[in-house]
């Protein structure tokens, strides 16, 4: 325990008094924090082989060093079990990838938030919820890992609301935002396999996502009917379509199975949604058309403005598909954040892994 | 760099995080989105002198000048 580098705070008070202090110091997300005692942090660190001082990522905007120790401190405060620490370390590793653009995500007025998606054996091993009430309450793993991700970028990166985090409105996913892929119920290869990792690898995808928008369709009888409904639903003007971005679809298993029954693979679904989920530029206001003509200029080339239709994602590959959730005819659409964020997938390394 | 009053302090902290604590930041009133062109032009005229100063002053002197400048806290801020 003596090897820990963090400043020590001697505090003699109750749980409530600790949390009043935390609020005053700006350490938390507003919910009560678990006090990060030396014992609790040391217990958290037993779940990794990495040294406590190892720097996993530099977290903007204040460029704080997210050492394994700092991640563990925030994991304790969020209520994580020690076995969740390797997952959290993998998420923080993703922040290092410049394609993710955490600096932009931290400071933007947009509501976008880091969304953690688990794949592979880790889902079962640590009992992440991939079924009923996927984005909702009820599972300690989802709830506390998502919360710890927020605490790391808040406490290490300095993403204080109104100071460095300038989200105009924010969204509930900024408290916690963590789901898992439901591979047993999916007709398609999981996202981490699509991105080159072996199926038996535990992996995490870190996306930047706006609040999920429900896609209810209990009547369509074919892939084309259902995807046509979805394409027309998501092709709306004031999601982040103003910018070239990715678009994340979380297909409920029943929707995915209906589509796959006809032999449609993920590539075909992406192509269909990219071609059909388009918004006619003439429906925007004149001022927004002027903005769009600059921000999504390639879509305007050689066309009269009345004929321009822009897609919800820049390319078919920017349509990302995950299958998750429980029974029922629902899916979710999560717009992303413009310009320069791309979701990142990486392997989770547990203690003892090569 | 030009920031509105609401975002100048954010710009300062981000530039400091990147090791550019003396980055010259010129403030304009907030907001600027959706301004008519003539209002935006007037705003530009209001900062022309400072921009000229920045473009014609040696970098070292600018760093000293702007590192010491205090930017107003965001008006929308509510403490927890």
Image (cartoon, coloured by chain):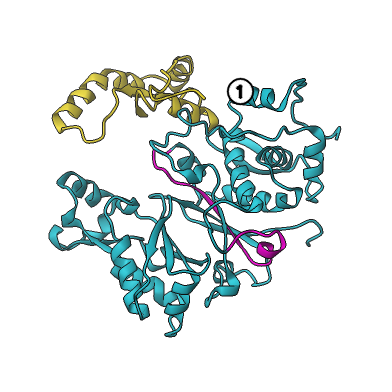
Q: Is residue A96 visible?
A: no
Q: Residue at x 34, y 22 (%)?
A: B27
The reply to whether the magenta stretch includes residue A110 is yes
Q: Residue at x 65, y 50 (%)?
A: A140
Left or right relative to A303: residue A255: right
The residue range painted magenta reads A108-130
Give the image location of residue A276, x and y in percent. 29, 69
Q: Is residue A148 visible?
A: yes
Please say if A276 is above or below A18.
Answer: below
Image quadrant assignment for residue A227: bottom left
The reply to whether the magenta stretch includes residue A275 is no
Of the pair B20 and A204, the residue shown nearer to us:
A204
Label 1, on which residue?
A25
Q: Residues within 10 Å of mark 1 (few under 14, many from 20)?
A: few
Please say if A34 is above or below A22.
Answer: below
Image quarter of the C terminus of chain A:
bottom right
Colour-to-chain, yellow: B
Left or right relative to A297: residue A60: right
Give the image location of residue A133, x and y in percent. 53, 58
Of the pair A129 and A335, the residue shown nearer to us:
A129
Colour-to-chain, cyan: A
Q: Residue at x 33, y 51 (%)?
A: A239
Residue furthest right as drawn: A2
């Amino acid at each position: 325990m003596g090897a820990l580098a963090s400043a020590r705070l001697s505090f003699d008070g109750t749980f409530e008094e600790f949390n009043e202090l935390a609020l005053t110091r700006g350490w938390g997300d507003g919910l009560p924090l678990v006090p990060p005692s030396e014992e609790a942090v040391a217990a958290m660190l037993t779940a990794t082989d990495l040294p406590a001082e190892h720097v996993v990522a530099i977290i903007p905007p204040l460029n704080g060093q997210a050492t394994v120790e700092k991640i563990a401190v925030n994991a304790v405060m969020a209520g994580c079990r020690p076995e969740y620490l390797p997952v959290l370390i993998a998420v923080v590793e993703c922040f290092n990838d410049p394609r993710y653009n955490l600096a932009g995500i931290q400071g933007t007025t947009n509501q976008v938030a880091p969304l953690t998606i688990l794949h592979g054996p880790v889902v079962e091993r640590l009992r992440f919820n991939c079924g009923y009430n996927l984005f909702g309450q009820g599972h300690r793993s989802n709830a506390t890992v998502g919360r710890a991700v927020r605490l790391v970028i808040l406490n290490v990166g300095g993403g204080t609301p109104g100071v460095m985090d300038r989200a105009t409105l924010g969204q509930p996913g900024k408290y916690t935002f963590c789901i898992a892929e439901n591979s047993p119920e999916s007709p398609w290869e999981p996202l981490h396999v699509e991105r080159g990792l072996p199926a038996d690898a535990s992996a995490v995808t870190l996306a930047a996502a706006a609040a999920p928008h429900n896609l209810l369709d209990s009547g369509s009888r074919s892939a084309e009917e259902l995807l046509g409904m979805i394409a027309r639903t998501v092709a709306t003007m004031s999601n982040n379509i103003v910018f070239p971005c990715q678009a994340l679809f979380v297909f409920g298993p029943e929707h995915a199975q209906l589509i796959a029954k006809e032999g449609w693979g993920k590539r075909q679904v992406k192509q269909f949604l990219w071609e059909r989920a388009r918004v006619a530029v003439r429906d925007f206001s004149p001022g927004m058309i002027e903005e769009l003509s600059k921000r999504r200029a390639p879509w305007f080339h050689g066309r009269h403005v009345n004929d321009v239709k822009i897609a919800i994602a820049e390319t078919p590959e920017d349509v990302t598909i995950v299958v998750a959730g429980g029974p029922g005819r629902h899916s979710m659409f999560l717009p992303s954040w413009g310009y320069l964020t791309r979701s990142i997938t990486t392997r989770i390394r547990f203690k003892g892994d090569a | 760099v030009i920031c509105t009053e609401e975002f100048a302090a954010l710009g300062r902290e981000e530039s400091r995080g990147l090791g550019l604590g003396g980055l010259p930041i010129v403030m304009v009133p907030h907001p600027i989105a959706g301004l008519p062109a003539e209002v935006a032009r007037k705003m530009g005229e209001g900062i022309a002198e400072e921009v000229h100063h920045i473009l014609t002053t040696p970098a070292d002197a600018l760093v000293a000048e702007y590192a010491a400048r205090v930017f107003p806290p965001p008006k929308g801020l509510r403490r927890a």
